[in-house]
Image (cartoon, rainbow, N blue to C red):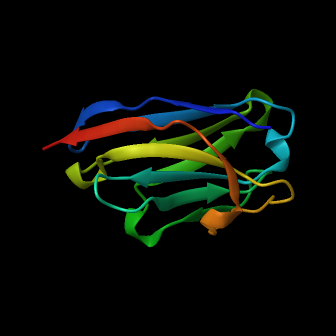
Amino acid sequence: QVQLVESGGGLVQAGGSLRLSCVASGRTFSNRGMGWFRQAPGQERELLAAVSSSGRITYYTDSLKGRFTISRDNAKNTVYLQMNSLKPEDTAVYYCAAGAAGVVGATRRPSEYEYWGQGTQVTVSS
């Protein structure tokens, strides 16, 4: 069992930055790939970025165009999402997710994520 708690969301002006954190409980954090997703009102949840269990391999959706960076600190059981040059269209609830047992890569498949946080709201004003 893995429990995930996100933090770091809030209200920011367009062009600003936020860093989201996701702290995981349990001993198997370092053995799992992790991902960040977001869901805006009326839209489907979308994968933004993923990181392998070691942190050496990352994946980003093309639409981010280098504005977001995913990283992890296995000693702290934490995964981060640094978000820069935020835009109003980035407004959404942001979720972190942990891969299922045996999923160690930066997987792009939502079906391979087994555990989810409760989400943190990010609102970008224009």
Image spot of residue 75 (x, y percent): 79, 30
Report the side of 101 relative to 56 (left or right): right
Residue at 33%, 30% in the rendered image: 10
Tell me which residue sits at (29%, 52%) in the image. Answer: 41
Figure check: 76 above or below 73 = above
Q: How many labels does the image show?
A: 0
Q: Quadrant of residue 65?
A: bottom left
Screen quadrant of the C terminus: top left
Q: Position of residue 21 (x, y in %)?
A: 55, 33
Query: Along the horizontal axis of the image, is 37 left or right of 105?
Result: left
Q: Indicate whether 82 appears above or below 110.
A: above
User: Measuring 40% from the left and 55% from the top, which residue is drawn there?
Assistant: 67
Relative horizontal placement of residue 94, taking residue 105 as reference (left or right): left
Image side of residue 66 versus residue 106, left or right: left
Q: Where residue 106 sits in the image (x, y, percent)?
A: 69, 62
* x then y, percent, for residue 35: 61, 53
